[in-house]
Image (tube, grey):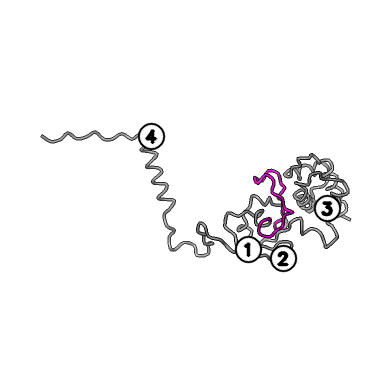
């Protein structure tokens, strides 16, 4: 007597999820075709390092870093430029603000390898020898800091704010400096310092 045929196996939530995961994994790890764009940058294998060149405060600096190293850690740990502060490490406080190709960037949110060949200015690069930058002088005149943890980021953001022309009023300065937090709440003095420095720069 022939064996009765088994009923078709019903799909369960588990079997559907398993098959979806297997399909997605096979697609994700499919080798790249040999005729892929030859001009595209080659990927860095896990655990390997890359050699990059950063122009920092007017000097070309060659670094060997892992792809995961942030610009903040490259500046502080590899180049010893500790003026750029590590605050929240999530891009919320602005303490790590630097200028990259003239624009303000939160260094904890960008990878060092992404800034290959970029022109980077940190707070250490603002002064001209013993002569402070007008923004630094204004921060001192207006006592625009207390603990100092946020000061370098505030100064760098203020330099960019003035260059961008966002100093028409106290309200405008507050708006365009809002990405930099001061836990000591020196905001009134910071706004006064930025307005004062803007007047000096325009002379």
Q: Would you say 44 lies left or right of 62 here?
A: left
Q: Position of residue 143 (x, y in %)?
A: 86, 45
Please report contact status of discs 4 and 3: CB closer than 8 Å, yes or no. Answer: no
Q: Earlier in the sequence, mark 4 or mark 3?
A: 4
Q: Would you say 198 lies left or right of 19 here?
A: right
Nearest the camera: 138 or 24? 138
Q: Position of residue 200 (x, y in %)?
A: 88, 53
Q: Quadrant of the C terminus?
A: bottom right
**In what element is the residue under mark 1?**
strand
Q: In the image, which disc is placed on residue 63?
A: 1
Q: Which residue is mark 4?
A: 13
> Magenta segment range?
76-101
Please report contact status of discs 1 and 2: CB closer than 8 Å, yes or no. Answer: no
**In what element is the residue under mark 4?**
helix
Q: Is residue 82 magenta?
A: yes
Q: Earlier in the sequence, mark 4 or mark 1?
A: 4
Q: Residues within 10 Å of mark 3 (few under 14, many from 20)?
A: many
Q: In the image, which disc is placed on residue 59?
A: 2
Q: Residues within 10 Å of mark 4 (few under 14, many from 20)?
A: few
Q: Earlier in the sequence, mark 3 or mark 1?
A: 1
Give me the C-alpha separation between circle 4 and circle 3: 62 Å
- Residue 163 found in image quarter: bottom right
Looking at the rendered image, the disc whose residue lies closer to the viewer, 1 or 2, is 1
Looking at the rendered image, the disc whose residue lies closer to the viewer, 4 or 3, is 3
| 198 relative to 3, above or below | below
Q: Earlier in the sequence, mark 4 or mark 2?
A: 4
Q: Which residue is mark 3?
A: 136
Q: Residues within 10 Å of mark 1 (few under 14, many from 20)?
A: some
Tell me what residue is drawn at x 43 percent, y 63 percent.
34
Give me the C-alpha separation between circle 4 and circle 1: 50 Å
């Amino acid at each position: 007597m022939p064996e009765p045929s088994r009923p078709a196996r019903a799909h369960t939530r588990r079997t559907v999820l398993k098959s979806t995961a297997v399909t997605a994994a096979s697609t994700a790890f499919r080798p790249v075709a040999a005729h892929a764009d030859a001009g595209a940058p080659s990927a860095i294998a896990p655990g390997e390092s890359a050699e990059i060149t950063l122009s920092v405060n007017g000097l070309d600096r060659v670094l060997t870093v892992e792809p995961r190293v942030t610009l903040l850690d490259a500046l502080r740990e590899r180049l010893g430029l500790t003026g750029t502060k590590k605050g929240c490490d999530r891009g919320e406080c602005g303490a790590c603000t630097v200028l990259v190709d003239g624009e303000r960037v939160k260094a904890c949110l960008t990878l060092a390898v992404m800034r290959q060949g970029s022109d980077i200015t940190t707070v250490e690069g603002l002064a001209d020898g013993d002569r402070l930058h007008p923004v630094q002088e204004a921060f001192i005149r207006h006592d625009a800091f207390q603990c100092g943890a946020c000061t370098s980021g505030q100064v760098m953001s203020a330099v960019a704010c003035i260059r961008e022309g966002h100093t028409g009023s106290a309200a405008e300065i507050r708006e365009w400096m809002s990405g930099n937090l001061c836990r000591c709440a020196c905001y009134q003095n910071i706004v006064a310092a930025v307005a004062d420095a803007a007047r000096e720069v325009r002379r």
